[in-house]
Amino acid sequence: MSTTVELPDTDEACAYCGLRIFDHDPICVRDCSDDCGSPTYFCNYACLSTYVDENNLTTGDACEWSPNDPDCC
């Protein structure tokens, strides 16, 4: 699988707060479990973290460990 790297437009807006990403510390995120689609840009880690929390993006993504469960990852 190959991915090309392209810089976003200078006026690219943060997916969470709508501010220009290059006025801050930008972060690019891709969902590579779905064919590495279009990138989503955030202006900083706080916006990314809040976006993840508000959209429950970590729910169900981790194994629940139990010492007596032989099927646990």
Image (cartoon, rainbow, N blue to C red):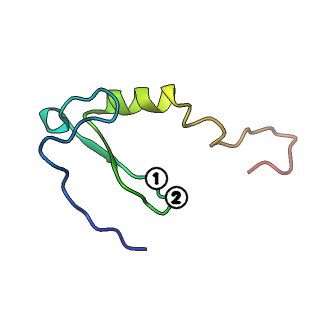
Q: Position of residue 49 (x, y in %)?
A: 41, 30
Q: Position of residue 47 (x, y in %)?
A: 34, 29
Examine the rendered structure and indicate whether residue 26 appears above or below residue 8.
Answer: above
On the rendered structure, is 15 left or right of 60?
Answer: left
Label 2, on which residue? 34
Residue farthest to the bottom, as pictured: 1
Q: Residue at x 78, y 48 (%)?
A: 72
Q: Residues within 10 Å of mark 1 (few under 14, many from 20)?
A: few
The reply to whether dot 1 and dot 2 touch (C-beta < 8 Å) is yes
Q: Position of residue 32 (x, y in %)?
A: 47, 58
Examine the rendered structure and indicate whether residue 72 appears above or below residue 37.
Answer: above
Q: Residue at x 34, y 52 (%)?
A: 39
Which of the labelled discs sits on residue 31, or is there none?
A: 1
Examine the rendered structure and indicate whether residue 57 appears above or below residue 40.
Answer: above
- Disc 2 secondary structure class: loop
On the rendered structure, is 71 left or right of 12?
Answer: right
Give me the C-alpha separation between circle 1 and circle 2.
6 Å
Instruction: Give the number of callouts.
Output: 2
Q: Residue at x 62, y 43 (%)?
A: 61
Q: What amino acid is labelled 1 in the image?
A: Asp
Q: Position of residue 14 (x, y in %)?
A: 27, 35
Pick the front one: 48 or 65: 48
- Disc 1 secondary structure class: loop
The image quadrant that residue 3 belongs to is bottom left
Q: What amino acid is labelled 2 in the image?
A: Asp
Q: Residue at x 52, y 58 (%)?
A: 34
Quadrant in which the N terminus appears:
bottom left
On the rendered structure, is 71 left or right of 38?
Answer: right
